[in-house]
Amino acid sequence: MSPLCEHCGENTKKMTQQVSVMRKEIKNLRQTLDGAIRAHRKHLMSIQAAVSKADFSGHNKKDCTSSLSAPDALEQGNIQTVPIGYISSCFSVKNGTPRQPTICGPSRAQLRIQQSVFNNPEHALVGLEQYSHVWIIFLFHKNGHQSYKAKVKPPRLNGQRVGVYSTRSPHRPNSLGLTLAKLDKIQGDTLHLSDIDMIAGTPVLDIKPYIPEYDSLNTRTGPESNPDLQTASEEKEAFFHLEDKTPGDEDEILHLRGKSEAGVCLRPPQTQFFLPEEAVSLLKEVESYVSKADPTPPDGEDKDQVSDCGETEPAAEIVDRPSYGSDSSTTIADWIREPPVSSLDVRFTPQAQKQLEMFLPAHPSEPSECDRPRFKFLRGPEEAGAAIRAVLSADPRSVYRRTRCKDRLFFFSLDTADVTCWFGQGFAEVLEVRPVGPPGPEDSCQ
């Protein structure tokens, strides 16, 4: 080998060594860069968390809240809610759970008051058995995320957007829910409910009795529900309809008219009767009507005699009170009564019907005599069938599922049964009703 070639070989060897060193350096730099990126992300997340907890003045909200006394924190709305209990329901997952309590009447649930809230939880329920329905204030704990938007797409609107506060969407700033449930019975510290739309594990924040006189517009206070006001109205109506009296009452009519023509005051002295202001106003109006019935007094009877009735003030103006009875005009959105999504016809295949009839009703005190499945809440196959029809007739699918996954099977759980169905044009057909088993393959459209 010539000296030149030998020199070139040494240079090549040196170059190879340098390349190897450079590769190691590059690898080290990459590792250092990856570590710096991870540290940067972690630091950025901590900054975002701190900013989310801080107000615009730079003070930490948590510190400010903890430094406030309990009354001050309550006045500012900074409260910590503690669930009084958790729902045990015939609906175990969101899929197939009714969106409103009136959809599925046979749906049942139980609510047990926690002993951590009251030392004697059953004491907090004393007297509640006198009511047939209760308001349940709960938390939408299965939203999946805390984000929310000002406009939402209710399933009944089939994709149209409206403001979140014009709907009952679970995706709200505070994730609070309200439902009216039927109170079947109370056993110790446990409430047995029906007509519910809550899934198992729902945290309950409060219970209030449903009182139609306060909560229903059809029974709000009006003239027909106030006995004193109604009596005054009847007196007024009776006077204005004297001409409608029967012939046997003519003497009474003449007697009253004789008093009015003689200037006798028809208003009873206020020192003898204690009437409400509304009744006094009506009587004043009656008096005004009587005084105008014959504007020219007889000869010899001057203004002085008419004034014996007392110096009356002008009839008090009657304020119209809002009546929420048959004359009320409550308004709701048009899409509530006539939604774009119509109700569906529900049918069972013969196989699904046979599978449903195999279930035994819920009888906790009686052990199962065979291997047949048993409901935990529902009272038999008939009630379960009615519940399935109610759920499917309201079309529990999401807008995405209706439009993108129309050809997919639909699964949901009801009590201890797994229901498989499919949807066609204007109908839903139940294919299988099997006992609850291990979860199958996930459906991306669920």
Image (spheres, rainbow, N blue to C red):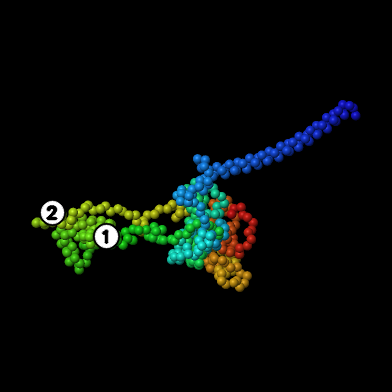
Q: Position of residue 314 (x, y in %)?
A: 22, 52
- Label 1 sits on a secondary structure element that is loop
Position of 292 compared to 131: left or right?
A: left
- Label 2, secondary structure: give it: helix
Q: Mark 2 belongs to which amino acid?
A: Lys
Return the disc, 1 or 2, that comes first in the chain's sequence: 1
Q: Which residue is depicted at the point 56% across and 54% down?
A: 142
- Residue 211: tell me if it is visible: yes
Label 1 crowd (10 A; few <14 / some 14-19 / many >=20): few
Identify which residue, 27 or 438, lies in the foreground: 27
At x 34% / y 56%, what residue is drawn?
323
One can see residue 395 in this view: no
Picture disc at residue 275:
1
Q: Front-most of 405 and 267?
A: 267
Q: Position of residue 41 (x, y in %)?
A: 63, 41
Q: Is the N terminus in the top left, top right, bottom left or bottom right quadrant?
A: top right
Q: Nearer the viewer, mark 1 or mark 2?
A: 1
